[in-house]
Image (cartoon, helix red, strand yellow):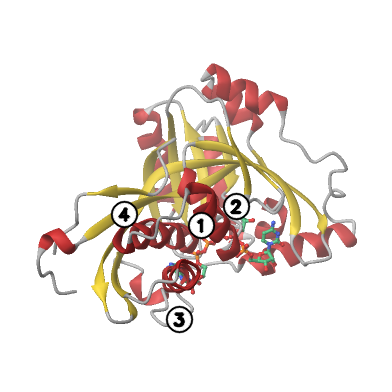
Amino acid sequence: MSTPGATNLITVRVPAKVNLELRVGPPREDGFHELATVFHAVALFDDLTVELADDVSIVVDGPEAELVPTDGTNLAVRAAHLLAERAGVTDGVRMHLVKGIPVAGGMAGGSADAAAALVACDHLWNTGLDREELHALAAELGSDVPFALLGGTAIGTGRGEVLSPALARGEYHWVVAMAGRGLSTPEVYREIDRLRDAGQAPEPPTDLSVSPQLMQALRAGDADGLGAALSNDLQAAAVSLDPALERTLSIGRKVGALGALVSGSGPTVVFLARDNGHALDIAVALTASGGVSEVRRTIGPVGGARLVEPVRG
Ligand SMILES: C[C@](O)(CO)[C@H](O)COP(=O)(O)OP(=O)(O)OC[C@H]1O[C@@H](n2ccc(N)nc2=O)[C@H](O)[C@@H]1O
Ligand SMILES: Nc1ncnc2c1ncn2[C@@H]1O[C@H](COP(=O)(O)OP(=O)(O)OP(=O)(O)O)[C@@H](O)[C@H]1O
């Protein structure tokens, strides 16, 4: 994108998420599933730079840019239109998105971009909306969008949009293994319903709450306890749709990952490591296995969508 007067540029950095725990209830009348989840923001980021323009547009860069739409279906574009409409703004915005979050990987990349666009355009247009109003717009855009605004570690209920920050101590080391092709979130939810109906996955939990063991491990900063408590009800569905994920999970377990699970709706798989050196061992084993398209190391928790110095180039 053109970079005229630097003072006109605003950049927002927004993180990916993993679900440390994801409990999925039966389908609701509106087609969504009631959840109890623990969101955790990790240091894989998208950067969105915006400047005033006559209409709303987006350019996308990064290794997976060709997988991201640049029309009105892009979640950042949808967020900008929604904010303009609700705040009565007639200005437009030119957006430049640098994607570092895997696309269609279950790490809420599109949701992150929607959150980044809300924060960036809110600033650019000086809308005067308060945090609750921005949160409500975020929830309209998608179930994962409010958490991308908040970041850190938080409990999500409802369809994932009702948040309360979790008491969490310490920094955790993660290894993220990408699968090379995406999974569709609605398809993964449909698959867990199908497996449950067929008796091939456990019944939906009757008591939808997060596990006390996991919350205790987070409070104590206990990585071993956290690794043992990681769980995801959608994992069986993601593995059913992409059976190669089982092998990826077992490679990480064999090299002593404290925990291994599919992230959200997958197919990205995440492993909890003891420390940076251990993360490197896990990453090397996964890369050597040849079964994954890319491996990255990261840490969490990190903050949600926030203004940073403009990214140039
Ligand atoms: C798998 C997770 O990433 C876990 O945090 C989220 O639940 C997905 O959130 P998201 O991608 O923001 O999903 P949305 O854009 O709100 O919904 C997309 C589709 O996913 C399914 N969906 C999503 C959230 C939810 N609680 N129940 C669902 O069944 C629905 O089919 C919905 O039409
Ligand atoms: N700004 C965006 N960035 C990435 N994908 C987008 C964006 N806008 C729309 N999409 C579309 O959304 C689809 C899902 O991409 P996304 O990266 O959000 O998946 P995800 O991480 O699995 O989502 P979640 O974890 O929230 O279920 C992509 O296939 C892409 O076509």
Element class at badge 3: loop
Is tag 2's residue or tag 4's residue first in the polypeptide sequence?
4
Expressed as whole percent of the image width and height from the top left, the position of residue 19 reads 58, 44
In the rendered structure, which amino acid carries the disc numbered 4? Val
The reply, left or right, for residue 14 in relation to residue 270 is left
Residue visible at 67% across and 51% down in the picture: 235
Which residue lies under the disc numbered 3? Answer: 72
Distance from disc 2 to disc 4, alpha carbons, whole Å, reads 24 Å
In the rendered structure, which amino acid carries the disc numbered 2? Gly
Mark 2 lies within 8 Å of ligand 1 (Cβ measured): yes
Residue 300: mark in rendering: none
Residue visible at 60% across and 22% down in the picture: 217
Expressed as whole percent of the image width and height from the top left, the position of residue 34 reads 76, 52
In the rendered structure, which amino acid carries the disc numbered 3? Gly
Element class at badge 1: loop
Whether the residues at callouts 2 and 3 have beta carbons within 8 Å, the answer is no
Q: What crowding class fits label 1: few (fewer than 14 Cα within 10 Å), some (14-19), or many (20 or more)?
A: many
Whether the residues at callouts 4 and 1 have beta carbons within 8 Å, the answer is no
Residue 264: mark in rendering: 2
Which residue lies under the disc numbered 4? Answer: 12
Which quadrant holds the C terminus?
A: bottom left
- In the foreground, 8 or 173: 8
Distance from disc 3 to disc 4, alpha carbons, whole Å, reads 20 Å
Which residue lies under the disc numbered 1? Answer: 108
Is tag 2's residue or tag 1's residue first in the polypeptide sequence?
1
Is tag 2's residue or tag 3's residue first in the polypeptide sequence?
3
Is tag 1's residue or tag 3's residue first in the polypeptide sequence?
3
Please identify the quarter of the rendering in which residue 29 is found: bottom right
Which quadrant holds the N terminus?
A: bottom left
